[in-house]
Image: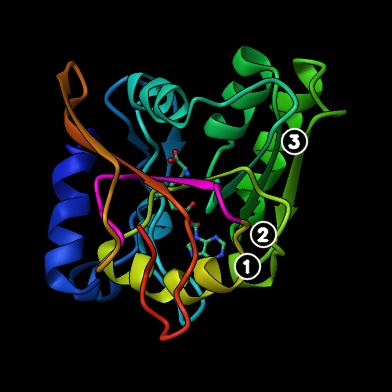
Amino acid sequence: MRVNIKNKFRKLENAGFNMWNQSPQGSATISDPQGQAEFYPQDLTTTDKSIAPFVPSPMDVVKMMLDLADLQPGELLFDLGCGDGRIVLSAVKDYGSMAMGVDLNARFVEEARKKAEKLGLMDRAQFVDGNMFDVDLRSADVVTMYLLRKANEQVKPKLESELKIGARVITHDFPIPSWKCETRVDLGGESGRHTVYLYVWRGLDCTGRLLS
Ligand SMILES: C[S@@+](CC[C@H](N)C(=O)[O-])C[C@H]1O[C@@H](n2cnc3c(N)ncnc32)[C@H](O)[C@@H]1O
């Protein structure tokens, strides 16, 4: 069974998850357009804790996210909701950074760890099987997120209270409500249309307003 996961993701956003929460759990796997991930319809459901379903970023989008972040060797990247770990692995392998991915789905975390081990990247790539709200972001140079708009809204207070000045936040497809992005890139290719947003955290003024 092949489905256009990009459209599914958009529908999910519009439907506030109800469509998938109510759909019966199938047994067929779904492949992403570049055939790099296999997952089950139940991975597209959410729970109280899960604020976004699993939809992998296509590899050309991953590259754009990391290029736009201007990720440097030795910097520390966090991917909030890392799925199969592709952003973390590319950050470490192709950009020489250190990176940590966190995901609620233990199966994805296990898969990501195995890939890191196979690639000999375990010394710089770390994967946590847990909730992104429990991860301390104070040491992050770069944070990447491919979540939903509503999820970005939920994560925003955590970013605002923990990020150091100058940290970059890159989001795929969904902006961070009320934050002003530095750069927005629209991509169109084999994997469909995607948008990547770059934010640089500059802090809040004494009235709690965003500094830009
Ligand atoms: C759209 S996928 C993005 C995967 C990966 N970052 C990428 O771009 O390819 C979102 C991921 O967030 C995870 N997730 C959702 N809520 C979470 C939470 N509260 N803590 C950690 N992971 C979460 C889901 O399990 C899913 O794998």
Q: Are marks 1 and 2 in contact (CB under 8 Å)?
A: yes
Magenta span has 98?
no
The reply to whether discs 1 and 3 touch (Cβ–Cβ < 8 Å) is: no
Residue mark closest to the camera, 2 vs 3: 2
Pointer 3 local density, CA inside 10 Å: few below 14, some 14–19, many at least 20: many
Q: Position of residue 176 (x, y in %)?
A: 31, 61
Q: Nearer the viewer, residue 144 or 141?
A: 141
Disc 3 C-beta below 8 A from ligand 1: no
The location of residue 186, given as percent across then percent down, is 16, 30
Q: Which residue is the site of mark 3?
A: 113
- Amino acid bearing label 1: Glu
Q: Which residue is under mark 1? A: 162
The residue positioned 66% from the left and 35% from the top of the image is 112
Q: CA distance from mark 1 to mark 3?
A: 26 Å
Residue 134, above or below 103: below
Identify residue type, mark 3.
Arg
Distance of mark 1 from mark 2, alpha carbons?
Answer: 6 Å
In the image, 123 versus 70, the foreground residue is 70
Q: Earlier in the sequence, mark 1 or mark 3?
A: 3
**210 to 144, vertically: above or below:** below
Residue type, label 2: Leu
What is the quadrant of the C terminus in the image? bottom left
Secondary structure beneath label 2: loop
Q: In the drawing, what numbered circle is on residue 175?
A: none
Picture quarter with the N terminus? top left
